[in-house]
Image (cartoon, rainbow, N blue to C red):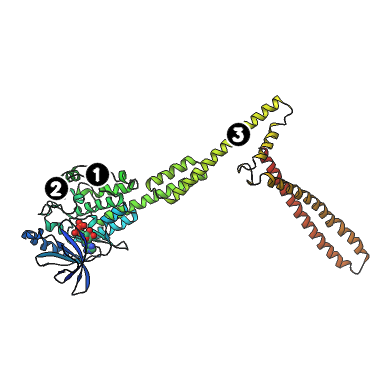
Amino acid sequence: MAEGGQQFGKYRILEELGRGGFATVYKAMDTTLDREVALKVLDPLLTRDPAFISRFRQEAKVTARLFHPNIATVFEIAEADGRYFIAMQYIQGGNLRDLVREQGPLPFDQVVSLIDQIGVALDYAHARRAIHRDVKPSNILVDGDGHATLTDFGIVKALGETNFQTTSGAVMGTPHYASPEQAESRPLDGRSDLYSLGIVAYELCTGNVPFIADSTPSLYYKIVHEPPHLPSDTNPRAAGPIEQVLLKAIAKQADQRYQNGQELASALRTAVRQLQELIESLYEQAVACLAEHDLDAAENKLRQILAINPEHKDAQALITTVNKRRTSSQRYQELVALVTRARTQAAELRRDDPNVSDPDGVLRMLAEHLDAHPLLSDQPSSSGSIGQTLRLLRIVAIVLLLVGGVVAIFLGWYIPLMEKVQVDRSLFAAEQMKMQDQLYANDILGFALGIGLSGLIFLGFSLRRSQRYGA
Ligand SMILES: Nc1ncnc2c1ncn2[C@@H]1O[C@H](COP(=O)(O)OP(=O)(O)O)[C@@H](O)[C@H]1O
Ligand SMILES: [Mg+2]
């Protein structure tokens, strides 16, 4: 084969890009225009056949009339030193076959975008009576921005499409994408390309093609007669509406398929949106179930989401929360059982020995020791000496508040009264002092009320706590 630097007419070979069944594709430099091109150099065995050359020229004429952003433009077909080659637009990036091999199924949004672009390209070509005949992932090139380009328009026809064998006997490309009408060598129209695009969509969604066999004849038999493997068997995510679209796209009868590329792409887009909406609604239901403490129902919804999309981060996080809740609820139940048992035993003990205090007294004592448990205590860490210190502080605070209240009443009522008596003796300052008294009394009353209220709140809080301990 060609070496780097080798010249084909005005093209200088730069590097090999890849090989198919009947040609090798090189990146080359058009030395007259100083631009990079892709050069598809045909197998010499193939070009010995004069019938092939005439078909090839005929097909190239059709292909060369196609100018579309999603179709690789053919610049020329030419011959140099007895070798036939096609010079076409060089597309940076990689082909879809390699992408699926590396990544497996692609994200559905990406599949929709790719099928949409190639669907539009096929509609354009079909409107100009050009049928591709070899739509497959290796003929779809994708650049870094996700722009897709279809290559190799009509070349299969030039090769004689009755079977995918070259004159040298090598199987051209892969027959996995052939439509039933191609497999049976029946006349074709654009819907044959749409079937192949449907197989591409199936593979992008699942990572596999729907029909696999040991030999081309048995593969063709399956394509014509057997139902395809369900997409959801390979990828549970490709279920429901997406599965329906994929199966319709590869219907055996052409008139039961999508009739053009746009129709296929928009059905797929709708199906992906429906699936996303289903996931969103299941997630909302799971959140609502969790709020109502229906842990089983919440888990059920979340498992449904994860069956569709195992990588759904929010659902994964929520299922962890559900499991935590379940554990703590189990621990709570255990604790309740424990306390009930203790209560029964305490009652029995009291029956046997009247010196033992009442059952709830025993339980209160037990509860003091269960301080560390978060479900029984407001302050999980306030066990031992910290708990005692806090209790002591609480008593000091209550005493201070009571004393403060008495002092406040004394200050607010008795002192102003005494001062008023004194003030009455001075007629000059009488008016002034009266005002001062008023202000003074207001201050003290406000202060006393404040202290009294906080004291009440504190007492209420302490009562509630002691009730909880006893419960
Ligand atoms: N116009 C192009 N620009 C860049 N790479 C291309 C172009 N055409 C084909 N290739 C690359 O060359 C490889 C070989 O192409 P081809 O001979 O058509 O075989 P196949 O399509 O079966 O892989 C393709 O897989 C593709 O990655
Ligand atoms: Mg190709």
How crowded pointer 3 is (Cα within 10 Å; few <14, some 14-19, many 20+) is rated as: few
Label 2 belongs to which residue?
Answer: 184
Disc nearer the start of the sequence (3/1): 1
Type of residue at label 2? Glu
| Side of 148 relative to 386 (left or right) | left
Label 3 belongs to which residue?
Answer: 338
State which mark lies toward you, 3 or 1.
3
Quarter of the rendered structure image containing ligand 1: bottom left
Between 354 and 301, the residue placed more toward the observer is 354
Outermost residue, top side: 352
- Whole-Å distance between the Cαs marked 1 and 2? 17 Å
- Whole-Å distance between the Cαs marked 2 and 3? 76 Å
Q: Please state the horizontal and vertical placement of residue 197, each as a whole percent of the image.
A: 24, 54
Type of residue at label 1? Pro
Label 1 belongs to which residue?
Answer: 228
Label 3: state its secondary structure.
helix
How crowded pointer 1 is (Cα within 10 Å; few <14, some 14-19, many 20+) is rated as: some
Q: Please state the horizontal and vertical placement of residue 13, each as a whole percent of the image.
A: 19, 68
| Badge number at residue 63 | none
- Work out whether 450 lies above or below 471: below
Q: Identify the image quadrant of residue 423.
A: bottom right
Question: Is residue 123 visible in the rendered structure shown here?
Answer: no
Asked if ligand 1 lies within 8 A of label 3, the reply is no
Label 2: state its secondary structure.
loop
Quarter of the figure with the N terminus = bottom left
